Amino acid sequence: MKACSKAAAMTLSVSAAALLMPTAACSGRPAGGAPDAGPVPAAPERVWPNEESAASSDPWIALHHAELREMRPRVLALNFVNAKTNGQMREQLRQVIDDFAEASRYHGYSNPDAPVFLRYQLAYLADLRDDPPPAGWRYNNSTRYPRQQPRRGTWGFDYGALFTQEFAQLLAIEDPAAPGRVLDLCALVERGLVHDVWVYADGDVADEAGAAEVLAIQPRYDSQRRRLPGPMNRCAGNGCFDDEDAIPSACTRTLRIAFFNHTRGPGCFMESLSHGFESMGAWNPDHIPSLSRDFVPFAGYAMDRRYGLPFDSWYACNEPRCLSYPTPTSVRYRFGGYQGTISPYDPVCGNVHFAPNARENYDLESPFAVDTTCTSFGLRDGPDGRDAGASFTVDAFARYREIASDCQGPFLVWWRQNFPGLDTTAIGADGEPILNWWPYLYY
């Protein structure tokens, strides 16, 4: 197809520098990723990205962690769904972005003036559909969807393909400093043009989905938040990249690749990315120790150490009604040969699958009221300088059933609003102040 000479200026950073849009095809549909956001006004350096720092894993983020007032990570959205236009994808993802913004408002459920901290930007919308699909094509995703045929590892989605020069040609995102030269994914991340990739696809065809909810690469840090030498952690998401997923050595900055099933809503996507946060905070405790130190108790992990149980968290339970609450301060468990009662018991904020009063995985209708210190996590506002307890029921997140209605979404908006966030005064178990957790996403 002949390319048209159709370029327009837009600003991708919070500076005033203008970049070029990718070339559009003569059909009028973008051949590559068309930027969605208009010019972003200049902002002080306390907003990231900015003129001094634009790329993830920049030492600037750790250095200015406590000063940051807002983060605006840039998303590259890949549309593989033949039945959905880029406009339809944009509208669906904008609702996702609004919900993530709401969930980043520290204690927003009780403070109507709590500011948004995490405000994703749709930087590029890549149209990777077939026009039209080949005759007899039986999949809902396009021929450009990178399938492994045959499937070799855990994932049928070929993540390695996203890093190739061939895929860069499909995206057709030009180098602002060298018009006509397209940038591959590692270069886009290195230059701070992209921080996250959202794969917009159909996950309902069983023999072709094969993608993880979210996978990530991220550096490792010491307890002082200094980056450690060594290879990137390929297991920084909900699972690991397969061995055959070749990620170039030039990719040395944090990157998340998340799968958005277009037949579902923002609540399910929030659940996926919340598992990614669990991975960063609990499943990889040596990844960013300053985060894990506090996230582990927040999310009710380390039950073996806290209560002497033979498992780390309630994820060990995969049976119906495995938990019950004889009193607001006790829990009874029975599953997989384990049974007993913990009293006194504080669920704190629970994990992604288990709200503080959940009876089983995904239980958002539990009738139990339980006492928990979640809303006072780290605030030391109770007796003897401990976190104050409060009663929790499913009414706590009822207001979010409309905006993030599917999967664990309603609970997770509330859960994430309890992350120590902007202007937190929380103190960790070791007596050290807890930093706002959101910047760790881009360490």
Image (cartoon, rainbow, N blue to C red):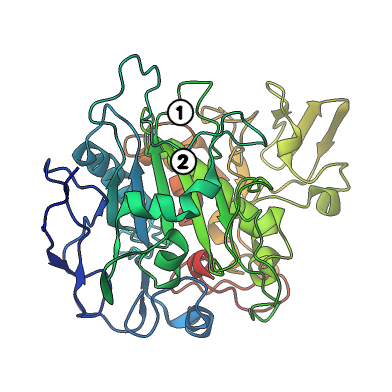
> How far across and how far down the image is residue 104, in percent?
41, 58
In the depicted structure, whether residue 163 falls above or below residue 92: below
Q: Is residue 256 left or right of residue 70?
A: right
Which residue does the numbered mark 1 point to in the structure image? Answer: 203
Residue 421 seen by the camera: yes
Could you tell me which secondary element the residue under label 1 belongs to? Answer: loop
Q: Hey, what amino acid is under mark 1?
A: Gly
Q: Is residue 356 left or right of residue 27?
A: right
| Residue 259, disc | 2
Structural crowding at the residue carrying mark 1, measured as other residues with C-alpha within 10 Å and reported as few (<14), some (14–19) or many (≥20): many
Q: Which corner quadrant of the image does residue 72 belong to?
A: bottom left
Q: Hey, what amino acid is under mark 2?
A: Phe
Residue under the image location 45 percent in, 71 percent down: 190
User: Which badge, 1 or 2, is on the more N-terminal residue?
Assistant: 1
Contact check, label 1 and label 2, Cβ < 8 Å: yes
Q: Which corner quadrant of the image does residue 284 belong to?
A: bottom right
> Front-most of 177 and 415?
177
> How far across and how far down the image is residue 22, in percent?
22, 58
Instruction: Tell me the CA gap for discs 1 and 2.
Output: 9 Å
> Front-most of 325 and 335?
335
Residue under the image location 12 percent in, 45 percent down: 26
Residue under the image location 43 percent in, 70 percent down: 422
Residue 274 seen by the camera: no
